[in-house]
Amino acid sequence: MKKKLTLTIDGDVYDEIGELPRKVSISEAVSLFLRMMIEVYKPSGMTPEEFSEYMQSDDRRREVFKYLQEKLNPVFDTVDSKVV
């Protein structure tokens, strides 16, 4: 099932999207990218502490990490408990 999502992205990323061939579906590309990130992160062996260190090492990532912890962590905990 597909769900609709509104994203806000940096201007330079938006400009680059305009350079993609018209046959490229931005929605499919974003879904693929997010799925890939999830699939790569889980089996990577990166501990939560290592991931936290990585995310805290840059101001922009720190901002995103804080948001993810506050807003999405309960969702991930629920998914994890059902997967494990």
Image (cartoon, rainbow, N blue to C red):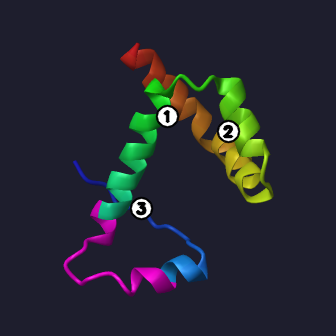
Quadrant position of residue 48: top right
Cα distance, mark 3 to mark 1? 22 Å
- Label of residue 60 in the image: none
Indicate the position of residue 42 as horizontal and vertical percent values. 47, 28
For residue 21: magenta? Answer: yes
Other residues around mark 2 within 10 Å, as few (<14) / some (14–19) / many (≥20): few
| Pointer 2 with pointer 1, Cβ within 8 A | no
Cα distance, mark 2 to mark 1? 16 Å
Q: As shown in the figure, which amino acid type bears the numbered disc 2?
A: Gln
User: In the rendered image of this protein, does residue 10 appear above or below residue 60?
Assistant: below
Of callouts 2 and 1, the N-terminal one: 1
Magenta range is 15-28
Q: Which residue occupies 60% across, 75% down? A: 10
Give the residue at mark 3.
5
Other residues around mark 3 within 10 Å, as few (<14) / some (14–19) / many (≥20): few
Give the residue at mark 1.
41
Q: Nearer the viewer, residue 76 or 32?
A: 32
Quadrant position of residue 63: bottom right
Q: Is residue 63 left or right of residue 71?
A: right
For label 1, the SS is helix
Q: As shown in the figure, which amino acid type bears the numbered disc 3?
A: Leu
Q: As shown in the figure, which amino acid type bears the numbered disc 1?
A: Tyr
- Label of residue 69 in the image: 2
Q: Is residue 21 left or right of residue 82?
A: left
For label 3, the SS is loop
Indicate the position of residue 14 as horizontal and vertical percent values. 50, 81
Q: Is residue 35 left or right of residue 49?
A: left
